[in-house]
Image (cartoon, coloured by chain):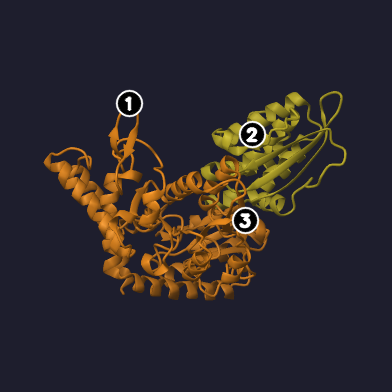
Chain colours: A orange, B yellow
């Protein structure tokens, strides 16, 4: 796998950022876009644009086919049983809100409990929080261990007869811990509890097989997967999409509308109300092809090697403290520096073209638990190299120089 | 070098050893500030006497070097200032940190102005301006003894 060739496919790296070569270490936040994805958006708008699923003219039919092609590409990529199990949303956030809202309406009552973990991103906590007020439910958090992992035992300990849903991350965007989601799913199902996986960080980096994992719901963020913004995917087992109520109402999701009442459309239309992010969906097809061309196993291997190298380099740097030490770790390196706030680190690194994220990374529960206000986070994508890690380390040393004056 | 302008020695000094960083025992006005984007927090305590003059000022909080230094320098400069002077200084500082090249107010001594101008490098870092202004907005709220938490996202 030739990273130089892969990096060349990302036009962002052709230009200097504030006179520096870009060292992009913020892919957990959002990944950069390959030329094929950018071109696909341009081509669609300039040569092929029409709304989908409504008109009968040539362009409308062609656009509808392109749109539905992506659904099939996604279905195959994640090995879902049926293309109708793929619902396009405006993001992973909307995907989780869709489940919380519709599942909550149909199945949750006062006293019922939802089990999350302390690793969850706000987007897999806040949607469930709404149900505290509207349905009177309780939310529990499975605790992390000292390595920043969630174990099967920690989940098991927190399941009780009132637990009606387990919603957990696939891969922590702070500690990098990869959760044993297949085992947790098996455990959940043995107790008749459905499970939602927040796959924002898992999907861009790990091989996905929905039928093997057997989870009920899996949320994907397309812009973290070398795809366009404004697009997410909810994978849901057909048995759930068939019985859950619709989420938003509007055009495209109905069968018949009368003054006295409305009947709703079949899958997948039932959950895709209004004009969807058509260009983004079509362009995301190119992201899937891009990933397929490289091969997700190759990506996993490259990123895993690079993460190990990053841990090694940063561990040797005495002033760096890495956050979390999970045995099974994704490509996230969160850290603190003694006496230097994460925002100061990010500003100083930025001066060298090293783009990282600083803050609580939408995980305040976890930061409270760790007793930290903010952390700095370098996160990797397919285009990163050991050279990027070395530049990160050099810039960290520069932080120390500035602050040790 | 913009970074050198941003992280001047005086800022690093105040950032590492903030002055008046304590809970004042003897305060009669206070307010809390919060930057929800980064989690920085500040709590400003004032002792305002019967002539509407700040006789004592202190703060508690945690945050980046810029926010700590800004709060620290602010508390040094605001001691013994009357309410009307506080308002003038806050406005002057906020305008300077966003656009004005210099401080306009005549209230401060030259060495005090130099100290405050050390924060002017923040101007080139739009994402960091709120780090510098949080304590000052919170001071304004404290003068009004506002119970509402000052939220940096509500200001320009």
Q: Is residue A232 visible?
A: no
Residue B101 is marked as: none
Residue A372 image offset from top left, x and y in percent: 65, 58
Callout 1: SS: loop
**Which residue appears farthest toward the front when viewing the image?**
A260
Residue labelled with disc 2: B93
Q: Chain of mark 1?
A: A
Cβ atoms under marks 3 and 2 closer than 8 Å: no
Q: Nearer the viewer, mark 1 or mark 3?
A: 1
Residue at 71%, 50% (x, y): give it. Answer: B14
**Numbered disc 3: secondary structure:** strand
- Disc 1 packing (10 Å; few <14; some 14–19; many ≥20): few
Q: Residue furthest left?
A: A58
Instruction: Between residue A78 and residue A258, name the one nearer to us.
Output: A258
Q: Note whether A307 is above or below A47 in the view shown.
A: below
Q: Nearer the viewer, residue A41 or A64?
A: A64
Residue wearing tag 1: A259
Q: Between disc 1 and disc 3, whose residue precedes?
A: 3
Residue designated by label 3: A140
> Considering the image in quadrants, where does the C terminus of chain A appear?
bottom right
Marks 1 and 2 sit apart, C-alpha to C-alpha, by 61 Å
Callout 3: 10 Å neighbours few (<14), some, many (20+)? some
User: Observer-nearest residue: B64 or A114?
Assistant: A114
Q: Is residue B140 left or right of residue A22?
A: right
The relative height of residue B89 versus residue A50 in the rendered view (above or below) is above
Q: Nearer the viewer, mark 1 or mark 2?
A: 1
The residue sitting at 41% across, 57% down in the picture is A20
Q: Chain of mark 2?
A: B
């Amino acid at each position: 796998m030739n990273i130089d060739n892969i990096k060349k496919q990302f036009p962002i790296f052709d230009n200097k950022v504030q006179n520096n070569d870009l060292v992009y270490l913020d892919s957990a936040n959002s990944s950069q876009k390959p030329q094929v994805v950018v071109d696909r958006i341009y081509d669609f708008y300039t040569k092929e644009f029409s709304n989908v699923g409504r008109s009968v003219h040539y362009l409308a039919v062609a656009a509808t086919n392109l749109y539905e092609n992506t659904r099939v590409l996604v279905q195959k990529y994640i090995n879902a049983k049926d293309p109708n199990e793929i619902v396009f949303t405006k993001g992973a956030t909307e995907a989780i809100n869709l489940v919380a809202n519709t599942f909550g309406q149909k199945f949750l009552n006062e006293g019922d409990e939802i089990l999350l973990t302390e690793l969850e991103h706000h987007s897999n906590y806040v949607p469930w929080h709404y149900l505290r007020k509207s349905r009177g439910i309780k939310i529990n958090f499975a605790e992390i261990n000292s390595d920043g992992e969630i174990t099967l035992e920690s989940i098991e300990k927190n399941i009780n007869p009132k637990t009606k849903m387990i919603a957990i991350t696939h891969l922590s965007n702070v500690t990098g811990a990869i959760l044993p989601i297949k085992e947790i799913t098996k455990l959940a199902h043995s107790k008749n509890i459905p499970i939602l996986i927040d796959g924002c960080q898992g999907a861009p980096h790990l091989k996905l097989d929905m039928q093997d994992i057997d989870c009920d719901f899996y949320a994907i963020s397309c812009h973290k997967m070398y795809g366009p913004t404004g697009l997410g995917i909810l994978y849901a087992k057909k048995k759930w999409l068939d019985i859950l109520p619709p989420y938003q109402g509007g055009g495209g999701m109905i069968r018949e509308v009368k003054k006295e009442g409305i009947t709703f459309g079949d899958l997948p239309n039932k959950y895709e109300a209004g004009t969807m992010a058509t260009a983004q969906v079509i362009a995301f097809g190119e992201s899937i092809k891009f990933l397929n061309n490289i091969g997700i196993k190759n990506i996993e291997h490259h990123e895993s090697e690079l993460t190990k190298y990053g841990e090694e380099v940063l561990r040797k740097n005495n002033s760096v403290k890495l956050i979390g030490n999970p045995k099974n770790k994704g490509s996230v390196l969160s850290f603190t520096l003694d006496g230097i706030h994460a925002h100061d680190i990010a500003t100083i690194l930025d001066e060298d073209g090293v783009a990282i994220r600083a803050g609580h990374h939408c995980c305040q529960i976890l930061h409270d638990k760790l007793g930290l206000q903010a952390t700095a986070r370098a996160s990797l994508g397919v285009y990163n190299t050991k050279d990027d890690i070395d530049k990160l380390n050099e810039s960290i040393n520069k932080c120390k120089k500035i602050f040790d004056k | 070098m913009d970074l050198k302008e941003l992280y001047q020695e005086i800022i690093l000094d105040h950032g590492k050893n903030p002055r008046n960083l304590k809970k004042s025992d003897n305060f009669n006005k206070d307010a809390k500030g919060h930057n929800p984007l980064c989690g920085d927090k500040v709590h400003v305590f004032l002792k305002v006497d019967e002539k509407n003059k700040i006789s004592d000022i202190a703060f508690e909080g945690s945050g980046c070097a810029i926010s700590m230094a800004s709060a620290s320098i602010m508390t040094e400069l605001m001691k013994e200032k009357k309410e009307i002077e506080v308002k003038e200084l806050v406005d002057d500082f906020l305008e300077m940190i966003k656009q004005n090249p210099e401080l306009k107010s005549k209230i401060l001594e030259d060495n005090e102005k130099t100290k405050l101008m050390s924060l002017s490098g923040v101007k080139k870092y739009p994402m960091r301006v709120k780090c510098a202004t949080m304590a000052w907005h919170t001071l304004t709220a404290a003068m009004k003894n506002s119970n509402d938490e000052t939220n940096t996202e509500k200001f320009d």
